[in-house]
Image: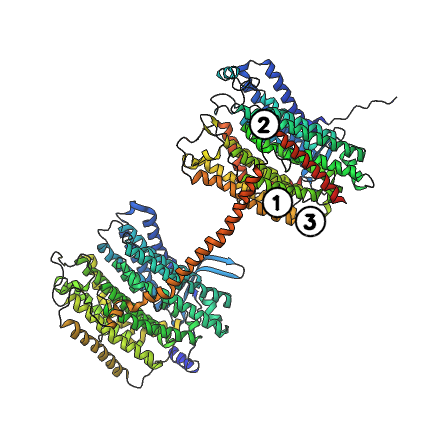
Amino acid sequence: MTSFDAPKIEYFLLAPVLIVLGAAVVGVLLEAALPRGRRYLWQALVAGVGLIAALVQLVLVCRRLDLFGGGDAGKGRLVAEQSLALDGPTVVIWALVLVFALLGVLLFAERHLEGGVLSFAGQAAALPGTEAEREASSKGLEHTEVFPLLMFAVAGMLIFPAANDLVTMFVGLEVLSLPLYLLCGLARRRRLLSQEAAMKYFLLGAFSSGFFVYGLALVYGYAGSMRFAEISAAVSGRTTGTGLLLGGIGLMSVGLLFKVGAAPFHSWTPDVYQGAPTAVTGFMAAATKVAAFGALLRLFYVAFGGARWDWVPVFAGIAVLTMVIGSVVAVTQNDVKRLLAYSSVAHAGFLLVGVLGIRSIGALQNGELGAVQAVLFYLVTYGFTTMAAFAIVTLVRDSGGEVSNLERWAGLGQKSPLVAGVFAFLLLALAGIPLTSGFTGKWAVFTAAVSAGWWPVVVVAVLLSAVAAYFYVRVIRLMFFTAPLPDGPSVAVPSVLTMVVIAVGTLATLLLGLVPGYLLDRIGDLSLFVR
Amino acid sequence: MTAALTSALTSVVPTEVPVVDPSSADGVLGLLWLVIALPVLGALVLLVGGRRTNAWGPGLATGLVFGSFGLGVAMFVEILSRSEDDRQVGQHLWTWISAGQWQVGADLLYDPLSALFVLLITGVGGLIHVYSLGYMEHDARKRRFFGYLNLFVAAMLVLVLAADYVGTFLGWEGVGLASYLLIGFWQHKPSAAAAAKKAFVINRVGDFGMALGVGLIFATFGTTSFAGVSEAAGRASDGALIAIGFLLLLAACGKSAQFPLQAWLLDAMEGPTPVSALIHAATMVTAGVYLIVRSNFIFELAPAARTGVIVIGCITLLYGAVIGCAKDDIKKVLAGSTMSQIGYMVLASGLGVAGYAFAIFHLLTHGFFKANMFLGAGSTMHGTDDDVDMRHYGLLRKAMPVTFLTFAMGYLAIIGFPGFSGFWSKDKIIETAFAQNPVAGACALVGAGVTGFYMTRLMLMTFFGKERWEPDVHPHESPRTMTVPLVVLAALSVLGGVLLLGDWIVDFLAPVVGEHEEEHLAISPLAFSAIAVVVVAVGVVVAWLTVGRRDVPREAPQDVSFVTRAARNELYGNEVNDALVVTPTMRTITALDAADGRAVDGAAEGVARSVGGLSAVSRRLQNGYVRSYAVALLAGAALVVAALLVVNL
């Protein structure tokens, strides 16, 4: 008889994930228990408090692990029977995901803009254009389930980048994806577009997950283990079965590259970004990208680091293709959400340039910028800027709701100089103009790639940054140097919730542009994976 | 005894250049910074304070300049009481620029040269402030005018008190700015705005000379302070010294309206008349002379550059005089005369140690009599509804006796009537020029004759002859605020010559410019003066014969000789500028613009268009069908796996 050993679970270290999941479950219960009128406040509170508690617990975890102690070896612990890795990159990514989720809760909870209701569909089951839908909106119904859904997605985003074996990673991927598919289809206005987006996202997401699982199986076939450490050992001492490994790497990369929105797996991005409720788009653009890049870094650096001479050239090609498609196609976009979607594709390309900077730990000179550090820093800068930008998109409205058609934004700078000015600043940050965080982020990833010898890709990246500057500045020109339309949209005054999101995002963009040093150094301390 | 010793020394080394080595300031000299700070304060209060200071601002500005003047007098008395070797005083305020080896302090230098300039700037400047109280009485922007005037005084004081070429350059640019603002003060007149722009642009050419000169000084000596440069000048190569000399000469040409950068000065008369008197006659335009005299340690060692200075001086003194002969606008005659008189000073400063003191002497006396005459001209304009055409004057001596009498003092001084200040100063320059170079001397002598002609013509057309003004013009004497400065300046014009008593000014400036034995001509100085007076008298008589005896037509006759026409057109200086600089520049710009439009923009827009085209094509791939997307995904996956396998082969 073999005895059953109970798995050892480090509850304290896992608490941030558990708190988020707990808050999500409480949210589901509240939805069942509370009368309709009181759900909004409780749901928003539970989500917000849960996220804050998770952040506080994260700080405690950080202290328990003594991550800032210095030293060369990767600090941190493998927890829950080695299925999750708690190390520097995990902490950074968790902190980012939690902060962006908190900002996302603020955006979700905004009720001023739609006249007292959430900007999500009143009754998702009612078909668009039917009597039932009209009834739902006239009764002022709203889906407060969006908050637990958001929390479930956040939990997935916490598990995904921390996963230290293939199955946990896949579970994290699915946990983060499914609630997002749902959220995408819940827009209050232009519901057909929203539902179409959700459908496309779901179908393509399922398709790409299929590739991911297939790849997972091939890698297991090659290495005989799900654990990254053992895969890594198998990769380093490889003898036979290379085809199995490479096929596995290729197919798993498809699943991850799909999530980050890299070409040629980006085609869902513009449609979904445009169709989804803007609050969801903003949250998704920032947090999903953070989580997915975290997972990608861990999988490829920890598990497949030994095979980097195989996959890095392919990634270089994908980075170039992604930047080209993101920057070039954005030039002819005339919808601000699609424009920002292509912008996010281009940024995925820039992030991949940073990923190319992988080197063995010994090769890194003291004080030199590492690839993980650079990519993590870029994620910080990009996330804050993009959330604030999408928050501003929710403000530009006319009688039909949000106006995302760029031509109708003409002359916005004359009507609302402050909002247009902030948006212009954020666009300049996305374009990577100095004195904004976009510049320091780009500088970081480009430096990392150049020190690893990938300067030709960096040259292409710099050239494409110039192309990208064109379409950002085009929007600025449109807002400030074009006569306003007589029936053009105006800027709605939001509640303090959205204002906080915009203020935090803009302030972070400005501060990280002016004094990036402190954060860059701290992230540098936290950029070693535990193996 | 000192004098004997120095003369013994100079006989061995005739061109001993004194080194600038100031002692630190104490006592009243410790207030040196305040001399500059007072007008700076005035400019700040008036320009920043805005309309609130309208009522008391002009009075405050005037008072502050007199405050500076008082300090200047006190400090002057202080250094007079010191021994000759102890008259250079420096004051270190703070470190202005610190870049590696290069240190520029905000340092001031007070020595006999700057002492005289401080007195001239604040003294004449103060009088002109008083005059302006009357002259600008009814101008709506009077406060702003006084703010600019104080700004000018402050900048000019920085120029002459700085102990470092960079500090001098700061003042240099500051007076350029003030000059620009004041020439264009009546900017509602297009001619004034254009004149301000012209002055600014032409001065820019000179300023570049200064900037390059300072740069070259730094490159050569590794320092830009007067002390450091004067100490190290002897060790520099000839080529560097000559280049620095010519660059500084270019700077002087711009600021002092010397040939070939003279064209702006006549147009600058568009500014209010007190401005013409203060900036474009007495002080700013003499900055070039100051720069050359201050840089004596450079010029003494670069004889080629000094020859250049002499040539420029000779050309300009004749050029200005010829223009003065033909103009009918009273201010333009005076402007031509200014150009010519500064030509004398430049000539003198080119003569080296023998001439520096006389250049400064003439600069001072000219400051008195020319300011006097400009203010007099302003007074006549004030009395004749701002008419400047002398052909519309005549017999103003009856209507404006004070103006006439004071103007006459200036007139006698400038033509060099024996005993008046101009006589002493100009005579010395001509004499020294003859001793060194007969050609330069001849030019200066002829110039003196022409000066006699055009100034007499001006006097006759303005104050004598028949009344030629319009019937509705009623000439009247100006108010007391205007006539009192006239009287003071007239007195100085008469008595300015006392500075030469016992060669006082030569000895006083010796610590700065060096000492030199007086040049001796073959004939006695007295006989030489007689010759000069005769030449001037010829000029005066010719003027009497051609202008005084005949009626002056109200309209300028058109059938005149080629020479007159050329002189009226300022010897075609503007046309030459147009042909040599403006037109080629404009052509080049047009060509560059076309090249930019076709080649550069063409390339840039071509790239942009191809990106746009590529974008339009590739966005079609985004067709909205999820099946197409799935196919793309599949193809991408196949591609990635294939690439991985290929890479691994």
Percent x, y for residue B501?
28, 75
Out of B36 and A306, give the one closest to the viewer.
Answer: A306
Above/below status of A112 relative to B87 = above
Q: For marks 3 and 2, give the one nearer the viewer.
A: 2
Which residue position holds label 1? A444
> Viewed as shown, does residue A166 lie left or right of B246?
right
Distance from disc 3 to disc 1, alpha carbons, whole Å, reads: 15 Å
Amino acid at circle 1: Ala
Above/below status of B73 relative to A340 = below
Other residues around mark 2 within 10 Å, as few (<14) / some (14–19) / many (≥20): many
User: Looking at the rendered structure, which numbered label has been put on residue B419?
Assistant: none
Which residue position holds label 3? A365
Q: Earlier in the sequence, mark 3 or mark 1?
A: 3
At numbered mark 2, what does the secondary structure look like: helix, strand or loop? helix
| Res. B14 in view | yes
Q: Are marks 3 and 2 in contact (CB under 8 Å)?
A: no
Q: Are marks 3 and 1 in contact (CB under 8 Å)?
A: no
Which residue position holds label 2? A197
Out of B92 and B265, give the one closest to the viewer.
Answer: B265
Other residues around mark 3 within 10 Å, as few (<14) / some (14–19) / many (≥20): few
> Viewed as shown, does residue B399 lie left or right of A273?
left
- Quarter of the image where the C terminus of chain A is located: top right
Distance from disc 3 to disc 2, alpha carbons, whole Å, reads: 46 Å
Could you tell me which chain the residue with mark 3 belongs to?
Answer: A
Q: Residue at x 64, y 27 (%)?
A: A203
Q: For marks 3 and 1, give the one nearer the viewer.
A: 1
Q: Earlier in the sequence, mark 2 or mark 1?
A: 2
